[in-house]
Image (cartoon, rainbow, N blue to C red):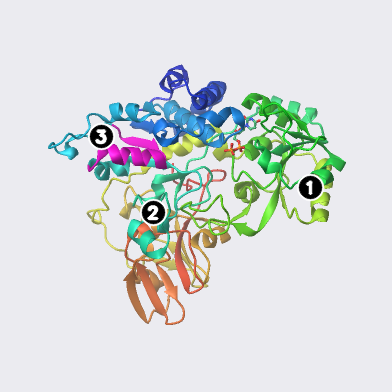
Amino acid sequence: QAVFRSNLSHLLELMGSGKESLIFMKKRTKRLTAQWALAAQRLAQKLGGTRRDQKQVLVHIGFLTEESGDVFSPRVLKGGPLGEMVQWADILAALYVLGHGLRVTVSLKELQSNLGAPPGRGSCPLATPLPFDLVYTDYHGLQHMKRYMGLSFRKYRCRIRVIDTFGTEPAYNHEEYATLHGYRTNWGYWNLNPKQFMTMFPHTPDNSFMGFVSEELNETEKQLIKGGKASNMAVVYGKEASIWKGKEKFLSILNKYMEIHGTVYYESQRPPEVPAFVKNHGLLPQPEFQQLLRKAKLFIGFGFPYEGPAPLEAIANGCVFLQSRFSPPHSSLNHEFFRGKPTSREVFSQHPYAESFIGKPHVWTVDYNNSEELEAAIKTIVRTQVDPYLPYEYTCEGMLERVHAYIQHQDFCAAPGPAPPGARAPESPFILAPNATHLKWARNASLVPGAWPPAHSLRAWLAAAGRACTDACLDHGLICEPSFFPFLNSQDAFQTLQVPCDGTESEMNHLYPAFAQPGQECFLQKEPLLFSCAGSSSKYRRLCPCRDFRKGQVALCQDCL
Ligand code: UDP
């Protein structure tokens, strides 16, 4: 049984010391202790007496190991990416506060001593049992584990969770398919269940959304901040000077209305990319950066970095976030940053989560090439008052709730066994909506005991040609849920939909199950690892499994707790 913890001092010891990255993470954890403790109290109340099993958890942060080059630690004090460290610090805190047994490793040596004796020559490698129920790591860490564990890696990989900022789509994850169809990258093809990859934002429902937290304000602080805002103060998003390149015109427009501040790292002189009229504070310690956001009215994105934590922090501190729309959208096909990442996702603005999950009045997404649109937006923003806002899923309680649900319910080791005893296929598994495109799963949830999310939250749609399931579900205010694909991958499902299949074939294709209009052919998915919410083709109408979600907690369905 796991017991909530509110004193984090032992966690700080577990995190080790020495590296700048660890110092940054520990400072953050220390600062957030009171918030975590309060969140634990609230979640404990919400869950009542629900039993929570205590798991033994290993967290192996691969990118911080010397063996993987540890390029981040030396950059912590120079404005390098801090988002990853924010997320790892919060993952550690969440696991610890939830009461699990925790080990943290940031070197290969530590990893090895925690995994137990290496499989020696002549001995049976499978004989070394993995002493952890769960292992959280990253792509670097996967390599380390595979190298060290040898054959037993296969056996235990279902216990691994991969922290993967931008996500891994199923087509890239399946080794054979990726190789045959041009989806092979430096990262993917591990043949994991795609839900084992955990992202920073809920952008790819094929993966699990892990997230991080942003500091929360109480009512008194909110009022204080609202009263203390300097209405003409803007802070530019970006710690690295290169982000400011080519932004002279934008800055001169903005400078007409606002006093511009920056937090760009510099060594001795002002970086040439940052104009003299900008008040540059240099890279600030995280609490001072928060203070700056509390005074500012506007936080401005210049298009990079993509999908970081800072805009959420700005919005939580009562700023408006202004960002550029990308047209055409950026993706691994046309942008260096995404090239080689195991996803085809198209990004329509610097921070799609802010745009679609938060939106106005907190977030303005405009065309920066259109000076009139930009100027009009700035003028309106200066005049409007906006309350601080933080989506529930980015609060400590929201993150604890989500991680708790994953730990208690996600099991990728269980073999997809035969139908449970007593279960029988219902005569009519679907209820047909009048327009014959919407199916509601009417099967009694008790027929699929233990399924998570529970099967009764399934809503199925036959998407329009060329539409991905991710989007088709969102069109209906729902989210795509890949674990429901098996329920739809049958001739039965097509029949109930009254899809006129001239023939049905079963093949490996990440767009299946789907209906191909020319030829009237129905296609079933042959390889369960390829079930994918992402992906579309004008040739196919995809059969999509959607589900509802909790307000402010998109990772969880209404009955998922
Ligand atoms: N940050 C900071 N000092 C600064 C600017 C930002 O400590 O001067 C922190 C900020 O609070 C955020 C983190 O850096 O939590 C990562 O921010 P960003 O969104 O820029 O993402 P990154 O590109 O670093 O992953």
Compare marks 2 and 3 and give the one earlier in the sequence. 3
The residue that disc 1 covers is: 250
- Does residue 54 appear in the picture of this structure? no
Against 39, residue 415 (above or below) is: below
Q: Look at the image and give the residue range highlighted in magenta.
A: 132-151
Query: Distance between the Cα atoms at labels 2 and 3?
Result: 24 Å
Ligand 1 in which quarter: top right
The residue that disc 3 covers is: 130
Query: Distance between the Cα atoms at labels 1 and 3?
Result: 55 Å
Q: Residues within 10 Å of mark 3 (few under 14, many from 20)?
A: some
Report the mark closest to the observer, 1 or 2. 1
Name the one closer to the observer, 559 or 203: 203
Please tell me the numbered disc located at residue 173: 2
Does residue 24 appear to the left or right of 494 in the view shown?
right
Instruction: Identify the element where label 1 is drawn.
Output: helix
Residue 252 in percent (x, y) is at 83, 44
Query: On the rendered image, what quadrant is the N terminus found in?
Result: top left
Tally of marks? 3
